Image: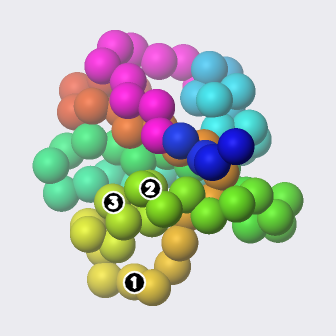
Amino acid sequence: MDPKIHIIKRNIELEEMQKLVGGLIEIATLENGDTLVFDEEGKLKEKPINEEATKLYRDNFITDDFIVGDAIVVKEGYFK
């Protein structure tokens, strides 16, 4: 199954984010104020590349890095 991006438009707790990405979280604040959340150790776990999350990440940061596994976009104002 391909990795997906969960769009969150509500307050979300740390434990729920960890469950959705399958591990410890890493965050990146996007230019529009949304927060991209992904598994900090996803590459070590050899999770598959998340093409959609990678494009979003590269559109916001000058990098050739990539995102693996499921990711979350927490809409602006909901990440605490």
Could you tell me residue 15's position as x and y percent?
67, 22
Per the image, the residue denoted by label 3 is 56
- Horizontally, residue 6 falls left or right of residue 18, namely left
The answer to whether 34 is drawn above or below residue 46 in the figure is: above
Q: Residues within 10 Å of mark 2 (few under 14, many from 20)?
A: many
Residue at image location 26% in from the left, 54% down from the top: 30
Per the image, the residue denoted by label 1 is 63
Residue type for callout 1? Thr
Residue type for callout 2? Ala
Residue lying furthest top:
10
Is residue 31 shown to the viewer in this render?
A: yes
**Which region is colored magenta?**
5-14
The answer to whether 55 is drawn above or below residue 53 in the figure is: below
User: CA separation, marks 3 and 1?
Assistant: 11 Å
Residue at image location 45% in from the left, 85% down from the top: 64
Per the image, the residue denoted by label 2 is 53
- Residue toward you, 63 or 25: 63
Q: Residues within 10 Å of mark 3 (few under 14, many from 20)?
A: some
Q: Which quarter of the image is occupied by the N terminus?
A: top right
- Horizontally, residue 28 falls left or right of residue 24, namely left
CB atoms of marks 2 and 1 within 8 Å: no
Q: Image quarter for residue 11?
A: top left
Could you tell me residue 57's position as x and y percent?
37, 64
CB atoms of marks 2 and 3 within 8 Å: yes
Residue at image location 26% in from the left, 67% down from the top: 60
